[in-house]
Amino acid sequence: MIDMAHPNVLDPTTAQNRKVAIGKYRDNKPYTGQRGTDTADRIDNDVLEITSAVFIPLSRMVLIEYNHFGARPGHIIQYLNTFLPNSDANRWEFELVAQEPDRGISDVEDSDDIRSIEFKLDISHGPIRNKEKNEKKRESLLMDIIDDSVKTHDVFGANVATLAFSNGRSRKDNVIKPDQLVDLVKELNLEDELFESVKVRYKSPKTGNIENIDLKNAGILKKVIMKDEDGNSGWELVADEMQMDYYVNGRTGDSKYLALGPFEVKALPEIVTDFPADQDSE
């Protein structure tokens, strides 16, 4: 954790909230340059990416800024767990459970009528980097198909490739199986820049209607704010905007933690403060 903003103790609504900046060092550093020239200078110092987060204890919720090169929820979990005892006799663990939108990937999984799935691939970043480590035949076959599509489009100089599967009218017994589709998609790293979108057309068991959903953005509750900013806003401004949007626009998801209950009240353990001298930190 790089920094934490002082809460407004005079505001009972947000007095317990904590706005923090979490840093993650980049392994692959970019270059500095000047527009209109061929200058490309290496960066000697370490490059630190900042991710803003807002902890809201009353709702047992954390709002986390998306930074492609910054800390992800998994990094935050790993960092906070370093301060908790972890022995057989006294084991504590911090956990983050993703909040899914009302129509998320589970809605697709519960459907018995999948009409089509379309992968839109951004191949402007070069060869495919999303090769599966999992050797299951179904997943590796899909990645082979995607890889071949990327290579074919690259031959023609195209920057975008589209790969679609759908149920044909003449083969009603050969339909897309929802459980297999969801398992397949879960195997993919949809955060990779390769996947611009993964759109599914299906009949929702929740609404009873034919719906369209982008699975790349459906796995976790997300919202776009600060659309007109240039991307260079300070971390505290980003955290302020996240918190304000949460309270102004209905406190989305504030009671979803109840589904994880029942809960037990426990006294927190003594925080670990002694770390090995060579321990790495994010």
Image (spheres, rainbow, N blue to C red):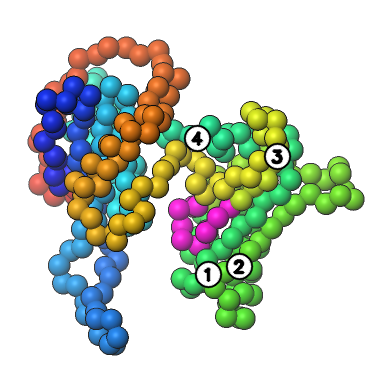
Dominant SS type (magenta): loop
* Residue behind mark 2: 161
- Placement of 3 over or under 122, stated as above or below: above
Residue 99, x across and y down, in percent: 44, 33
Please check the rendered image and state whether residue 191 is part of the magenta-colored stretch, yes or no: yes
Using the numbered discs, state the Cα–Cα distance from disc 2 to disc 1 in whole angstroms: 7 Å
Tell me the mark number nearer the camera, choosing from 4 and 1.
4
Using the numbered discs, state the Cα–Cα distance from disc 3 to disc 1 in whole angstroms: 30 Å
Disc on the earlier residue, 3 or 1: 1
Please check the rendered image and state whether residue 112 is part of the magenta-colored stretch, yes or no: no
Using the numbered discs, state the Cα–Cα distance from disc 2 to disc 3 in whole angstroms: 25 Å
Of 134 and 180, which appears nearest the observer? 180
Q: Is residue 122 left or right of residue 72?
A: right
Picture disc at residue 101: 4
Which region of the structure is painted magenta? Answer: 189-198
Tell me the mark number nearer the camera, choosing from 4 and 3.
3
Dot 2 and dot 1 residues touching (CB under 8 Å): yes
Q: Quadrant of the N terminus?
A: top left
Picture disc at residue 22: none
